[in-house]
Amino acid sequence: MMRRLPPFVLSLFLVLSANAVGASVGANAVAGMAGARRGSPLEVFLKAEYPQRPAPGLIAGKGEWEEAGPEGTYLRWVCAEASPVGEYRLLAVCGALESGAHPDGGILDLYVMRMNTSGALEVVVREKGIESGGGTYGYPEVVSVMRIGRRKYGFVLEHGVEYGDYGVERVRIMAAGPGGIREVARWQTHEESGLPVRCGDEAARVMDDAIQFTSTWSFDRRASRLNMWPLKIKVRGRNECQSISGRYRIPFDAQAGLYRIPESELSWELE
């Protein structure tokens, strides 16, 4: 039996899920997830790739199945799927560790596929068993599909954790390239610490939070001809006694195969 998420993690998971739906390819993604009907190309592919999966009619959040994984038994489900570009189809299958404790994350399988001449889905590139999340009681990141370039779509992975008085939300983007599906960007979107800090001399007031900042982001679609659009990130808040305010426009570094996020309050390392 999958353990129930604590209130903070559950509410954050629901918020990130709502954001993911809003940021994804919208109706195509929702319609696609309902498209795994008996005999459909997606249903045939899933049956071959995941023999333990129940059939048919899988919709995200329903039709889960159990599967052995690297850390134990995982609850699996289709968590993002869309056909945004011609014959190509993007698919994400999530896995939540059933015995997950607070520090644990889950796993993700990501696919880029296309329809062949016989009408079946064939894999262009896949990455399976990606470690995802952490501090989420065994759950992976929230996944959505988003347009990230002229004719390019990628996976957006959102992640939030809380440790006592400290909370942080993060995002990373994964896209298909010559070396497979790889992470091309990661940064923090929100950080908050409930620990008080004194600024200046003894007469100075005590700040309510040592750290509190939020960032908003989007892709710069004005660069419409680029295969990978620049990232736009706006940050504001404070870090202890210093105000934080910044705007970043980050082009894709084609040679390195990633967005070079500035080493600032946006940076974070995977645990």
Image: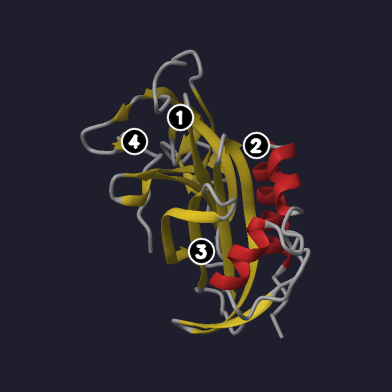
Q: Which mark is residue 74?
A: none
Which is more foreground, mark 4 or mark 3? 3
Q: Which residue is mark 3?
A: 108
The percent position of residue 183, horizontal first and vertical second, equals 37, 48
Q: Which residue is mark 1?
A: 243
Which is more foreground, mark 2 or mark 1? 2
Classify 247 as above or below 209. above
Q: Which mark is residue 25?
A: 2
Q: Which residue is mark 4?
A: 261
**Amino acid type indicated by mark 1:** Ser
The percent position of residue 118, horizontal first and vertical second, equals 56, 52
**Amino acid type indicated by mark 3:** Leu
**CA separation in Å, label 1 and label 3:** 37 Å
Label 2 residue SS: loop
Which is more foreground, mark 1 or mark 3? 3
User: Which residue is drawn at the image coordinates 59% and 63% (left, top)?
Assistant: 45
**CA separation in Å, label 4 and label 2:** 25 Å
**Amino acid type indicated by mark 2:** Val
Please report whichever mark, 2 or 1, sits nearer to the chain's N-terminal start: 2
User: Which residue is drawn at the image coordinates 49% and 44% (left, top)?
Assistant: 211
Mark 1 in CB contact with mark 3 (< 8 angstroms): no
**CA separation in Å, label 4 and label 3:** 24 Å
State which quarter of the image contains the N terminus. bottom right
9 displayed left or right of 58: left
Within-10-Å neighbours for mark 2: few <14, some 14–19, many 20+: some
**CA separation in Å, label 2 and label 1:** 35 Å
Label 4 residue SS: loop
